[in-house]
């Protein structure tokens, strides 16, 4: 029987944990019949306090799919002390057959055990949103526009875990509940009953499971609410990493989007050699403090790690990244990150030069931040594979204008075709679209070398990041990068940049220096970055309303964007796409409210307004 070290309590009944879960949470919330009534396109949301072993989630997931439900299940669960995947499998392995392969699927997709919001699409119609953190802090920054339909109040007995069972919890439940939401809990403690009643729930005692004589169930009465109107047709402008991520996230949310891409298939064929050998690294952007940026990039990195690892086309290799602490600023930032981000050492730690050399397989002269979950993948193949999830792809279509529908409905015309909603995800070129022309974004040129690997690089086992980067060899080829040139718009390969890339490598990793310098070969790309070097995602602000009056400021109806992902786009685009899908469907938000606000486009005019300056 698995037991919590923090609370000195068992996770489920020693008599029969699965039977207990079915009695308390599924029958207590009448979910067998409620699941069966979920119609096509409808979403049913469960919120659980205390993920534990995942027993309640697996039971609900199984019941939902076996009920004949036609819609979607969004299961949200908070956990402050997440177990290891092996502990979960060990605790629940005896019921594996009852879950029909779902236990194995959960363990395979279990997120990194780092604080943050972690969306996990476990099947076509079921999403787990695991919120790792303190329940009080999480609920204060959590939103669910369509409301929570059923609550599982778990998380150890009130006497063992009094910090969870508070009036703040019960008030948050009332605030987040859908009309006629229900709850069930194994406890019948008087303070819990009074707290729920004080929040507006009707509460009744019913027979408990096993030795527990009583438990509590109840409802929050209310008139039917208005659910989010889900768009039936969506256009995604831009078919790169950001656009393909949006297509993927929408498809998993039940929305098939059309994709518009300015390049033709022939354009891609012209770069066939480069795409055949070009791999890109994925790792989080590191900051000293756990601010909104750190929260975003932590969750985004964990999501990227799972998605790329599960998609064969991405050819992901989770080999780890060593980030050189080769300046005082980096050393301080990496040390502070390890102190403040609350990541277990299994996911991030400082290593000295000796250990770094053992990890890398080549001599390293600097201490490093080691991220064992980082890696690299075939970005082009990933984009090509996920783009196929679109309803239709229009290649060679550079969209320069979108026109609002004038019949009173919030829609848009794209290339003469009407759509309920549009997502702008074409990098810096979205500035050519009038509604987005005001955004303070710019392109940053990067040149990387793709050259035959030399024999001294063969032992290299992980990515090295030192101000430039080098990746382990693939098929006899090596990638060394990269320049960062905001001021340059030359798409061609430049000899000076080629020399600079290899000079930086030789300076930081002398044993991997190329001598003689290989012939000029590689590629250039233009990343989009914002004024404040943070992505822009969500609804697009109507800047004209800001210019008229701050009090009148609003968003463009059904117009979204995902851009300015900079050099960490392989990480940030995926979570931003999930965020936009949340906004469109009204499902439980995969981002804390403070992080979603930091991503919004209206942050720029807000800053100017605070300084008393004119609007953009």
Image (spheres, rainbow, N blue to C red):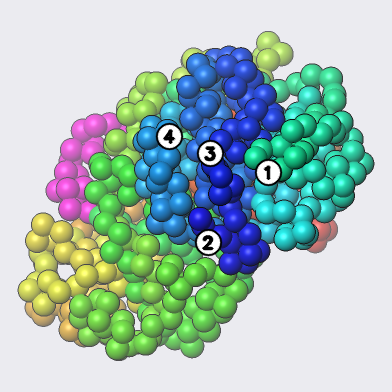
- Nearest to the observer: residue 565 or residue 297: 297
Residue tagged 2:
114
Label of residue 18 in the image = 3
Q: Earlier in the sequence, mark 4 or mark 2?
A: 4
Looking at the rendered structure, the secondary structure element under dot 3 is helix
Query: Magenta region's main secondary structure?
Result: helix
The residues colored magenta run 262-278
Q: Is residue 60 left or right of residue 9?
A: left
Q: Is residue 383 left or right of residue 196?
A: left
Q: Is residue 413 left or right of residue 278?
A: right
Q: What is the C-alpha distance between the residues marked 3 and 4?
A: 10 Å
Residue tagged 4:
99
Dots 3, 4 in contact, CB < 8 A: no
Specify whether residue 277 is painted magenta: yes
* Front of the two marks 1 and 2: 1
Q: What is the C-alpha distance between the residues marked 1 and 2?
A: 36 Å
Q: What is the C-alpha distance between the residues marked 3 and 2?
A: 27 Å
Q: Is residue 155 left or right of residue 299?
A: right
């Amino acid at each position: 029987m698995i037991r919590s070290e923090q609370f000195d309590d068992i996770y489920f009944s020693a008599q029969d944990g699965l039977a207990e879960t079915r009695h308390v949470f599924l029958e207590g919330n009448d979910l067998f019949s409620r699941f069966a009534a979920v119609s096509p396109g409808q979403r049913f949301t469960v919120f659980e306090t205390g993920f534990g072993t995942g027993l309640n989630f697996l039971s609900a997931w199984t019941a939902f799919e076996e009920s004949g439900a036609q819609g979607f299940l969004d299961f949200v669960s908070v956990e402050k002390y997440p177990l290891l995947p092996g502990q979960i499998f060990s605790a629940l392995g005896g019921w594996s057959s009852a879950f029909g392969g779902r236990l194995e699927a959960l363990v395979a997709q279990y997120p990194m055990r780092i604080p943050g919001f972690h969306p996990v699409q476990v099947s076509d119609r079921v999403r787990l949103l695991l919120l790792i953190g303190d329940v009080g802090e999480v609920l204060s920054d959590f939103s669910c526009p369509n409301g929570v339909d059923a609550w599982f109040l778990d998380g150890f007995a009130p006497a063992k875990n009094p910090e969870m069972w508070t009036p703040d919890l019960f008030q948050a439940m009332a605030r987040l509940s859908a009309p006629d939401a229900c709850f069930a809990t194994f406890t019948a403690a008087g303070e819990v009953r009074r707290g729920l009643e004080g929040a507006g729930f009707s509460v009744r005692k019913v027979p408990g499971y096993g030795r527990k004589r009583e438990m509590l169930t109840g409802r929050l009465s209310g008139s039917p609410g208005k659910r989010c109107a889900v768009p039936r047709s969506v256009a995604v402008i831009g078919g790169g990493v950001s656009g393909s991520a949006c297509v993927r996230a929408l498809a998993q949310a039940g929305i098939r989007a059309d994709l518009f891409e300015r390049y033709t298939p022939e354009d891609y064929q012209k770069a066939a050699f480069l795409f055949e050998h070009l791999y890109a690294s994925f790792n989080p952007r590191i900051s000293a403090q756990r601010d909104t940026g750190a929260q975003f990039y932590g969750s985004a990195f964990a999501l990227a790690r799972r998605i790329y690892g599960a998609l064969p086309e991405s050819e992901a290799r989770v080999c780890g990244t060593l980030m050189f602490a080769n300046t005082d600023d980096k050393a301080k930032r990496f040390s502070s990150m390890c102190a403040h981000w609350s990541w277990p050492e299994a996911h991030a730690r400082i290593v000295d030069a000796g250990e770094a050399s053992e990890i890398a397989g080549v001599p390293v002269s600097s201490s490093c931040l080691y991220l064992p979950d980082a890696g690299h993948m075939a970005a082009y193949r990933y984009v090509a594979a996920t783009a196929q999830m679109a309803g239709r792809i229009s290649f060679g279509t550079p969209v320069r204008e979108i026109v609002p529908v004038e019949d009173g409905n919030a829609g848009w015309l794209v290339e003469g075709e009407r759509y309920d909603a549009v997502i702008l995800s074409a990098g810096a070129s979205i500035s050519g679209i009038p509604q987005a022309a005001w955004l303070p974004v710019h392109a940053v040129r990067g040149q990387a070398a793709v050259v035959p690997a030399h024999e001294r690089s063969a032992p290299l086992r992980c990515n090295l990041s030192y101000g430039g980067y080098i990746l382990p060899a693939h098929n006899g080829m090596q990638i060394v990068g990269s320049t960062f040139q905001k001021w340059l718009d030359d798409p061609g390969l430049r000899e000076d940049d080629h020399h600079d890339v290899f000079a930086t490598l030789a300076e930081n990793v002398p044993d991997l220096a190329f001598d003689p310098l290989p012939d000029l070969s590689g590629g250039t790309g233009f990343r989009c970055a914002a004024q404040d070097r943070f992505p822009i995602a969500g609804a697009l602000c109507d800047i004209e309303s800001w210019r008229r009056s701050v009090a009148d400021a609003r968003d463009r109806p059904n117009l979204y964007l995902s851009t300015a992902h900079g050099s960490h786009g392989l990480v940030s685009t995926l979570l931003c796409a999930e965020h936009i899908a949340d906004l469109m469907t009204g499902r439980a938000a995969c981002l804390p409210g403070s992080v979603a606000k930091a991503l919004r486009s209206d942050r720029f005019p807000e800053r100017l307004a605070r300084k008393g300056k004119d609007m953009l």
